[in-house]
Image (cartoon, rainbow, N blue to C red):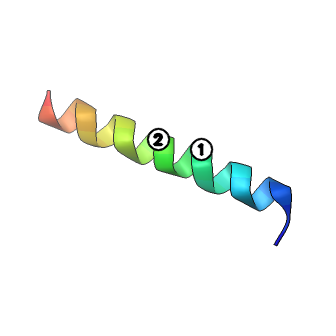
Amino acid sequence: YGNGAKIDAQKKDIGRRAYIIILKD
């Protein structure tokens, strides 16, 4: 499980949170 996979997972999580915030707004 490489470091690149961790960074990719973080980016996806941030993107999902931003999407949820936009929907709530």
Where is residue 1? Give x, y as percent. Answer: 81, 73
Answer few, some or many: residues within 10 Å of disc 1's Cα (few below 14, many 20 plus, some between 14 and 19). Answer: few
Q: Which mark is residue 20?
A: none
Q: Residue at x 14, y 35 (%)?
A: 24
In the image, is 19 to the left or to the right of 5? left
Where is residue 5? Give x, y as percent. Answer: 75, 60
Answer few, some or many: residues within 10 Å of disc 2's Cα (few below 14, many 20 plus, some between 14 and 19). Answer: few
Q: Secondary structure at mark 2?
A: helix
Exactly how many numbered labels are in the figure?
A: 2
Q: Residue furthest right?
A: 2
In the image, is 12 to the left or to the right of 3? left
Q: Quadrant of residue 21?
A: top left
Q: Is residue 5 above or below residue 18?
A: below
1 and 2 marks in contact (CB < 8 Å) = yes
Circle 2: residue type: Gly
3D distance between C-alphas at marks 1 and 2 = 6 Å
Dot 1 corresponds to which residue? 11
Q: Nearer the viewer, residue 9 or 22?
A: 9
Where is residue 12? Give x, y as percent. Answer: 54, 50
Q: Residue furthest top?
A: 25
Dot 2 corresponds to which residue? 15
Q: Quadrant of residue 11?
A: top right
Circle 1: residue type: Lys
Where is residue 9? Give x, y as percent. Answer: 62, 56
Q: Residue at x 49, y 50 (%)?
A: 13
In the image, is 16 to the left or to the right of 10? left
Quadrant holding the C terminus = top left
